[in-house]
């Protein structure tokens, strides 16, 4: 499952949030 992310955002936080938002968002919403 290779995904392409836009790592040229210039900010590690934005890149991390994009990964978390893409993969873990349904799981986090379920636990809330």
Image: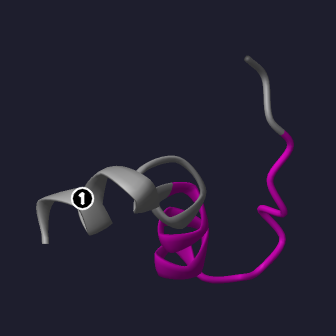
Does 2 sit above or below residue 30? Answer: above
At x 24% / y 59%, what residue is drawn?
30
Position in image of residue 12 (x %, y %): 52, 72
Q: Position of residue 2 (x, y in %)?
A: 78, 23
Q: Residue at x 84, y 63 (%)?
A: 6
Was residue 15 drawn as part of the magenta stretch in this picture?
yes
User: What residue is drawn where x is 56% and y is 56%?
Assistant: 19
Say which quadrant the C terminus sits in.
Answer: bottom left
> Dot 1, how many residues are within 10 Å of its Cα: few (below 14), some (14-19), or many (20+)?
few
- The residue singled out by tag 1 in the image is 30
Task: Say which quarter of the image contains residue 14.
Answer: bottom right
Location of residue 26 by image quarter: bottom left
Magenta residues span 4-19
Residue 3 as seen in the image, left or right of residue 19: right
Report which quarter residue 11 is drawn in: bottom right
Most foreground residue, 25 or 6? 25
Residue 27 percent coordinates (x, y): 31, 50
For the N terminus, which image quadrant? Answer: top right
Number of numbered discs present? 1
* SS at mark 1 in the image: helix
Q: Give the answer, above or below, for where 1 lies relative to 22.
A: above
Work out which residue is located at the far top of the displayed protein and give it.
1
Residue under the point 80% across and 35% down: 3
Lateral position of residue 8 relative to residue 23, left or right: right
> Is residue 18 toward the left or the right of residue 31 in the image?
right
């Amino acid at each position: 499952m290779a995904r392409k992310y836009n790592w040229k955002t210039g900010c590690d936080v934005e890149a991390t949030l994009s990964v978390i938002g893409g993969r873990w968002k349904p799981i986090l919403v379920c636990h809330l």
